[in-house]
Image (spheres, helix red, strand yellow):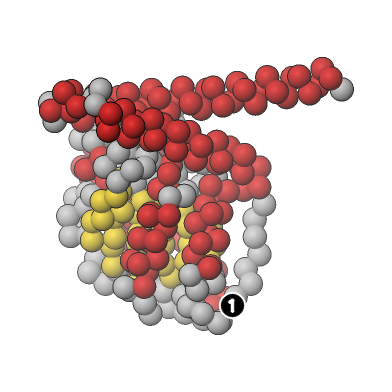
Amino acid sequence: MITILSFLIILIKLVVALTALTVLLSFTVAWYERANTKPDLIERRFTLRGVGISIWLLILETVCLLVTIILRPFGWINPKISPKFNGKKTPIILLHGLFQNRACLFILEHYLRGAGFNNVYSINTPPWRDIETLTESLVKKVDELRLAFKVDKVILVGHSMGGMIGRNYVQNRGGSSRVEHLITLGTPHYGSKLAPFAISSMGRSLLPGSDFLKTFNSVNWPRETALTCIYTRYDNIVLPAKNARLDGAENIELDGMGHTALLFHPQSLSRIVDALNRNKS
């Protein structure tokens, strides 16, 4: 028993250390990228404020990433559709990012329900599948919810790569007539300079200037679907952070958080609800 307990403690310490190291490396690359575009950052790196912001970002992002790891096993359970017609009826589908599963969306899901959006669902989008296959899974879920709720349209909220899947459905797969509003969170619309480190083909396709992104962004966004892009200026995954913006969308820049924290930070959660309330059906 002591041996097993010791092993678990070592394993937990290892997971925490690797998570913290991953976050540190990603923020280091992100700072290098920002410093190249804003040289004045080099002079401010060792100021009290600069050090304080850095420590806060590292701790917050590490904790948020650890939460997604702890919750991950629960994401393998697929929920049943139970329509609720009190509150805001329009169903909302949450889409997670690369190398995550639907468990990372539990806090957001709970927050939205507390704000009156009772019918919130999420699906798993495995990283080893291509974007068209994952979009097909979304097509099925949209049609399933439209039938269950007897509505014409749904709302999509996508974090990171989930936003790209939502975009693909709306602008390339005829989903504009079925989606009322798409909200993206830290989505690499114009790619990320961290893409070369991705171990999946879908991740590597997000290299800025890739043929995939050129073709993807050459299609105009349909006017009948509202589009909101929420992102953080301190994103440690989408590099540069401005690549999470889209022309023609309502772009909302946040502060004081990294990429994963967009799913947990009160400021981000409240902005999502604000965006949803501005586009009530």
Q: Amino acid at mark 1?
A: Lys
**As displayed, is residue 113 above or below residue 163?**
below
Q: Which residue is mark 1?
A: 84
**As displayed, is residue 23 above or below residue 263?**
above
**As displayed, is residue 237 above or below residue 132?**
above
Q: Is residue 6 visible in this depiction of the protein? A: yes
Residue 79, picture quadrant: bottom right
Position in image of residue 232 (x %, y %): 30, 45
Q: Quadrant of the C terminus?
A: bottom left
> Which residue is painted at 32% across and 39% down in the image?
235
Position in image of residue 61 (x %, y %): 44, 36
Position in image of residue 279 (x %, y %): 33, 73
> Which residue is painted at 73% across and 24% down in the image?
8
Left or right, residue 67 beside residue 179? right
> Which residue is painted at 43% across and 78% down in the image?
152
> Which residue is painted at 37% across and 39% down in the image?
258
Position in image of residue 99 (x %, y %): 49, 37
Left or right, residue 95 beside residue 231? right
Left or right, residue 169 beside residue 77? left
**Helix, strand or loop at mark 1:** loop
Left or right, residue 121 beside residue 275? right
Residue placed furthest toward the front: 48
Q: Quadrant of the N terminus?
A: top right
Residue 49, picture quadrant: top left
Residue 27, picture quadrant: top left
Instruction: Between residue 49 and residue 24, name the one nearer to us.
Output: 49
Residue placed furthest toward the right: 1
Q: Dot 1, crowdedness within 10 Å: few (<14), some or many (≥20)?
A: some
